[in-house]
Amino acid sequence: MTGTLLNIATVLLGGTLGLLFGARLPERVRGTVVAGLGLFTAAIGFQMFTASHNPIIVLGGLLVGGILGEFAQIELALQNLGGALERRFAGGSGEGGAANPFIRGFLTASLVFCIGPMTILGSIQDGLTGDYSLLAIKSVLDGFAALAFASTLGVGVLFSVLVILLYQGGLSLLAAQAQAIISEPMTAEMTAVGGVLLIGLAISSLLEIKSIRVGNFLPALLIAPLLVAFLTALGIN
């Protein structure tokens, strides 16, 4: 859990600095910063997608995961959580869905900070051996991202640490069991799916090209490795 706690600290520090000093930047500068983060996030997503050994598995994971996410209304649940946090701690109405700046900041930061190979591999490494070097690198990146996000998306970014604690911390606690069942091919397809989700996040929340309910695709991160395990059991590589 050491790496997760470090990650939370850097996000809080970066986000606080963004709230305190970000408003001093002209709107056009802050917009350009977020656009730059969007382009970089998309580029990282493309890079992660190339880890796939079988893009059909990624497609299948996205389709099945997206359908499950729509039925479970994960995106709506995250929006409702963001709205409840805003009402409790920020004095806002908690309404407006993804268009609400607080909820948008919460959703965007939560997804950016929790999707990616560093999160998965770093959490497993931290949980198994206590080596949090990967998460330390991720923490530095997240701290700078939190500064930029908070300066434009507001205080909702800070509350993404709750998702980091639950998701990333949970992965660390379950690392021993996960390591026993997750193979390299499974990790590769999970990483590739994460890359596609990052591209969707960049298009939707950061570059604002088209609205996409990226949160509803999160089950794909589980479906893709399960498909790999299923095909392996059938003797299909």
Image (tube, grey):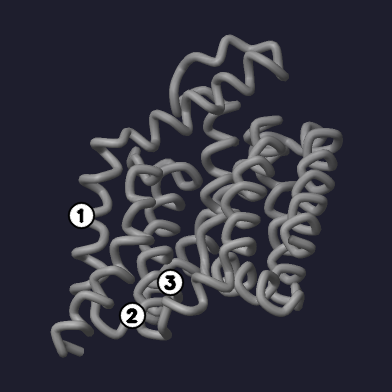
Of the numbered discs 2 and 3, the one sitting upstream in the chain is: 2
Residue in the foreground of this view, choosing between 178 and 112: 178
Residue 161, position in %: x, y? 68, 44
Amino acid at the residue labelled 3: Thr
Q: According to the image, label 3 marks what residue?
A: 191
Q: Quadrant of the C terminus?
A: bottom left
State the residue at coordinates (21%, 65%): 59
The front one of 4 and 79 is 4
**Residue that appears at 18% across and 73% down:** 56
Dot placed on the residue nearer the N-terminal end, 1 or 3: 1
Amino acid found under the numbered disc labelled 2: Ser
Residue 64 marker: 1
Residue 171 appears left or right of 58: right
Q: Which residue is under mark 2?
A: 52
**Residue contact between numbered discs 2 and 3, judged by CB atoms under 8 Å:** yes
The image shows residue 153 at horizontal and vertical percentages of 63, 34
Height in image: 168 above or below 15? below
Q: Earlier in the sequence, mark 2 or mark 1?
A: 2
SS assignment at label 3? helix
Residue 144 spot, x, y in % from top left: 74, 56
**In whole angstroms, how far apart are the C-alphas of marks 1 and 3?**
17 Å
